[in-house]
Image (cartoon, rainbow, N blue to C red):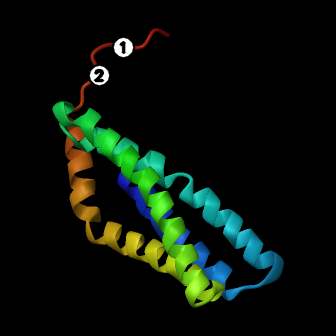
Amino acid sequence: ANTIILLFLFISTAVFLLLSWVSSGITSGIFLALTGLSFSGVFPGLLALTSLILPERLKGSALGVLSMLGGLGGVILAYITTSIAQRVGLYSGFLVILAIAAFAAIFFMVHFNKFFKMELALKNTYKPEGRAAV
């Protein structure tokens, strides 16, 4: 299910960020690379989940808004991180990213059951219209 994959991705992103923060050198670089790999699946997973659980009349608008907010979130996150890093220090700027990733993982965990039940209910009612040619 998409919700299980997303839960894994959110948690692994936060954990890899934490591990990259507490480690140093090449180990930190490896954990940052793993963070990028886990985070690269979050947005497509959210798009897939959104297109699955929303009714047909809302899908296009919801996917457009989600895409727009994804772009704005990237800009705002970069702005907040650099502003804090300039004022307080680079160490604190990195903590902002870690805190936001942890918040996203916790937020998704809190709402996991609702998303999972909606996804399962819709997958159980989906019946393919035809059979694929073999």
Which quarter of the picture shows residue 109?
bottom left
Three-letter code, disc 1: Arg
Query: Is residue 21 left or right of 114 when viewed as pictured?
Result: right
The mark total stands at: 2
The residue carrying mark 2 is 128
Which quarter of the picture shows residue 82?
bottom right
Three-letter code, disc 2: Pro
Residue 102: x and y in percent read 44, 76
Residue neighbourhood size for the residue with mark 2, other residues' Cα within 10 Å, grouped as few (<14), some (14–19), many (≥20)? few
Residue 123 visible:
no
The residue carrying mark 1 is 131
State the SS at label 1: loop
Which residue corresponds to the image point at 70% horizontal and 64% vertical from the top-left? 33
Are dots 1 and 2 in contact, CB under 8 Å?
yes
Q: Is residue 39 above or below residue 99?
A: above
Residue 117: x and y in percent read 22, 54
